[in-house]
Image (cartoon, helix red, strand yellow):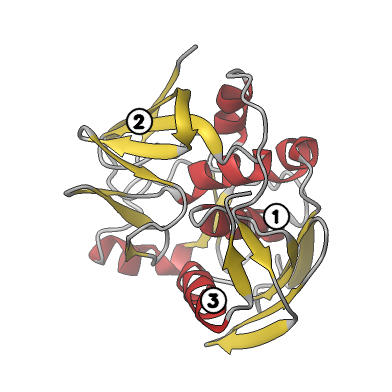
Amino acid sequence: MTTRLVGVGLHGGRSASVRVSRCDGWSRFLASGEAVELGAPTIVRCDQGVSIAVGAATLDLVEHAAAALGGLGLREGVSLEVEGGEVPLLDGGAAELVRALSSLGVAPSPPRLVVTRAWETSIGASRYALEPSEGVELACEIEFEHRAIGAQRAVFHGDPAEFAREIAPARTFGFARDHAALLARGRARAVPLDAVIVFDDEGVTPGCRLAWPDEPARHKLLDLIGDLALYGGPPRGRVVATRPGHAATHALVRAALATGALARTDG
């Protein structure tokens, strides 16, 4: 069974699509006839979204699709073929991707990463604490000065049903004051208000509505799951991330693997 989802790229502002189907071996992204498996991606950029190298091509905004794979535990057996250079924004989270992936009937598989020992590190304004555990547990803590957000916390216990219900629908968000600067850097060319929560100085921009008061924390958790899933995670173990960001999380994985706090496993 194959499902094709069509939409617009958040950053490129152009039509984009992703075709979801079953495959043999590790789950993978495909673009322009090339493929890259989950496990050891080449990160091209991770500012306001994550781009990876797929052969000679660059594939943008992969974190929501990766989060769907990681949240459902689909580390094997799934192919995501992307056209348009960017995974389409779709609903702004991962809910549509979860429905498409769930229709494939692929069974979950164990994480390819495991936390081996207690370890903490700070990367810029981000802090991470790792601890061994038999299951998968991620906690994401955020804090923004914006009065509509403040301090929030969201947790994932590794259950695919929990991810589909509580995390996947959480949409990406940003601030109106930052949009001009993002455009100047070639980012955020398409910002549909049904898929992106935009905060202005007063609160939520007219035309936007929060699905939950803590939707920003849930989406930051979704992003964290997606970043870790690109390496074969989320890992078996407990991870507490305070003010995480894409660049910091990717630096965390590299550092934790180098120090042995994270280890690779074939399951």
Check disc 3 and give the amino acid type.
Answer: Leu
Check disc 1 and give the amino acid type.
Answer: Arg
Task: Name which residue lies at 62% across and 87% down.
Answer: 121
Tell me the distance, in whole angstroms, between the alpha carbons under discs 2 and 1.
26 Å
* Residue corresponding to mark 3: 252
Mark positioned earlier in the residue sequence (1 or 3): 1
* Residue corresponding to mark 1: 218
Against 89, residue 97 (above or below) is above
Label 3 environment density (alpha carbons within 10 Å; few <14, some 14–19, many ≥20): many
Against 115, residue 234 (above or below) is above
In-front residue for pair 136/257:
257
Q: Residue furthest top?
A: 1
Residue 50 position within the rendered picture, expressed as x and y whole percent measured from the top left = 40, 58
Q: Residue furthest front?
A: 266
- Residue 168 image-quadrant placement: top right
Residue 63 position within the rendered picture, expressed as x and y whole percent measured from the top left = 48, 51
- Residue 161 image-quadrant placement: top right
Element under label 1?
Answer: helix
In-front residue for pair 22/265:
265
